[in-house]
Amino acid sequence: MRANTYCLTVLSIVCLIGGCKSDDKKKIAPPQSGTSARPAQVIKVEAFELKTSSVSEKLEVPGSIVPFEATELRPEVSGRITQLNIREGQQVGKGTLLVKLYDEDLQAQLKKLQVQLNIYEQTASRQAELLKIDGISKQEYDLSVLQVNNIKADIELIRTSIDKTEIRAPFSGRLGLRNISMGAYVTPATLITNIRQENELKLEFTVPEKYSSRIKTGTQVKFTVEGMNKTIPARVIATEEAVMEDTRSLRIRAVVQGKAPQLIPGAFAKVQLDFGTDNQALMIPTQAVIPQARYKKVIVYRNGTAVFETVTTGVRDSSNVQITSGLNVGDTIVTTGLLSIKPEAKIAISKLN
């Protein structure tokens, strides 16, 4: 009797648990296949209709004023200074003797060779007369002529060595600070002073790579320096043969046309470049451009859908940027809600500028 009661109790518990599981399955049963999906949300945006406009392509880049010619003056040989004709800041002409080194030993060798040359020339002259009457052989006369020529070569060598003891101005210009004093012993590594040609000046600057093809020899540019209220013209005389890899810019050199007291070598200059006016430029608001790692994107409205286009930008002003490729006249450019829009998203224009 007790055994039957126990069995009935266990059976009741099992049935109760099974019923609970059946109810849970009914509660979490998935919806039937005929249920409709939730419609995609349409994003409200403002847009800009792309039209052609006129834009002046101007660029301002930093530059430097440099002397037309500049060099360091160093001796070619070692020696003691016996003559010093350098006044700091002095204007000197080309060929002016600035420094003279000790050369008395070379002068003595020169005098000795000149005496020997005189004797050998007299000997060669007498032998020439003897050769006419067959008094000597042709070989003896040729040896005398050879000795004369050898002495002349030695004299030229000594004179070249004497010339190396003189330091002369390589061009007309202004001397810099003097680094030596009278009686000092100098070597080819010793810096005597600097000399700069200042009657003409050069302007050096760089332009970004995309403008490199638009700067040519003869191009006219303008620049200003600190403390001047007027612009000074310059003419491009040369460009570097290649774009610098580290800065992706092209180095330009121009000659300054005109002279002003404020223009001194080393001065900072603001170079103004004018590439003319483009009457068919495509300008869009700056905020419409989405910068990415390697490209720039713009969202275009097409048939209610957001289309991401890769673009190339050009010149900028305070609020707009030029598009040189990637867009066409009449395109509708999205200008708001850019961060919340994904490719192929549904959008609606609330305001068209």
Image (cartoon, grey):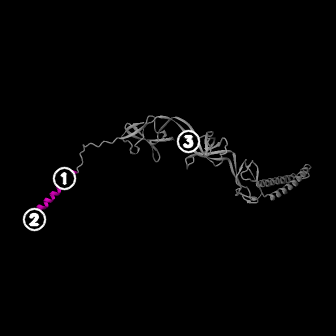
Residue 144 point in image, percent of width and height:
86, 53
3D distance between C-alphas at marks 2 and 3: 104 Å
Which contiguous range is marked in magenta? 1-27
In the picture of the structure, the residue carrying the numbered disc 2 is 3
Q: Is residue 109 above or below residue 252?
A: below
Residue 215 point in image, percent of width and height:
59, 40
Residue 300 point in image, percent of width and height:
42, 39
The kind of residue on which mark 2 rests is Ala
Snapshot quadrant of residue 8: bottom left
In the rendered image, the quadrant that contains the N terminus is: bottom left
In the picture of the structure, the residue carrying the numbered disc 3 is 59
Q: Residue at x 14, y 61 (%)?
A: 10
Residue situated in front as seen by the camera: 19 or 91: 91
- The crowd level at tag 3 (other Cα within 10 Å; few <14, some 14-19, many 20+) is some
The kind of residue on which mark 3 rests is Leu
Q: Residue furthest left?
A: 1
Snapshot quadrant of residue 241: top right
- The residue mark sitting in front, 2 or 3, is 3
In the picture of the structure, the residue carrying the numbered disc 1 is 23
The kind of residue on which mark 1 rests is Asp
